[in-house]
Image (spheres, grey):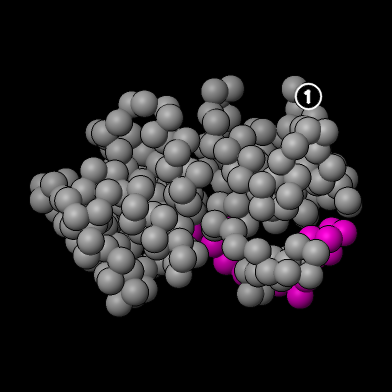
Amino acid sequence: MAKAKILIVEDDAEIARLTAMYLQAEQYDTRIVDRGDDALNAIREFQPDLVVLDLMLPGLSGIEVCQQARTFYQKPIMVMTACDDEFSEISLLKMGADDYLTKPVKPHVMAARIEALLRRWHPVNVDSINCGKVVIHPRQQRVQFDGNPIDLTESEYRMLLLLAEHTGQVVTREACCKALRGINYDGHDRSVDMRISGLRKKLNDDRAPYKMILTVRNRGYMLVHD
């Protein structure tokens, strides 16, 4: 029995073949799509547990696929890009990607990142977590702010849930990075900051001084009751 279904969106046939072969050896059920404009239908039809998405694609770019997929798909999206520009990676996190890898990708690193993302994508066995105006429903993976539902990416949701589980306590950048990406914080990773920035905007708390998600200098972040 397959561990999970993974959709590979990659226009390089050899990279796609090798990626699928490696993931199949790891007991994943895979499907390959080689165009961005075919990816959205494939996500709807295949209902993957995770999408591996190339950045440079014919039809629609990886950014466009990510943006459009997030209107109906909430499970993890991991981007593989040949770009070394940090701005491209930060942009993808803002657009809804949950993680990224820069090519050439080492298969064992890719497998570890995929396992980490899938391991964290599961409902928590509680009905709700109340943090002032923020109410999290882990079983349905829904979030309400001031009584209204808000749309979060999977990674934003996981970040908020992590902070909510430690309300009133500092959650270090190291802990955030380890929980969200399965890797140790190296002092330069911006993915945690980008997710915090996205959350603040959606919680109307994106202007200093922050009232809900506080930055604790040289330590990390803390969620407080507003």
- Between 31 and 213, the residue placed more toward the observer is 213
Q: Quadrant of the N terminus?
A: bottom left
User: The residue under label 1 is which amino acid type?
Assistant: Arg
Residue 124 within the magenta-colored segment of the rendering = yes
Give x and y (percent) for residue 29.
28, 68
Q: Residue at x 34, y 52 (%)?
A: 64
Residue 38, quarter of picture: bottom left
| Badge 1 element | loop
Asked if one can make out residue 220 in the rendered structure from this viewpoint, the answer is: yes
Q: Residue at x 66, y 74 (%)?
A: 139
- Between 178 and 77, the residue placed more toward the observer is 77
- Between 135 and 169, the residue placed more toward the observer is 135
The answer to whether 160 appears left or right of 120 in the picture is right
Count all numbered tags in the image, as a single digit. 1
What residue is disc 1 on? 217
The part of the chain drawn in magenta is 118-134
Crowdedness near tag 1: few (<14), some (14–19) or many (≥20) residues, C-alpha within 10 Å: few
Q: Residue at x 60, y 63 (%)?
A: 151
Residue 42, quarter of picture: bottom left
Q: Residue at x 69, y 45 (%)?
A: 200
The answer to whether 35 appears left or right of 182 in the picture is left
Residue 10 within the magenta-colored segment of the rendering = no
Asked if one can make out residue 124 in the rendered structure from this viewpoint, the answer is: no
The answer to whether 72 appears left or right of 141 in the picture is left
The answer to whether 168 appears left or right of 175 in the picture is right
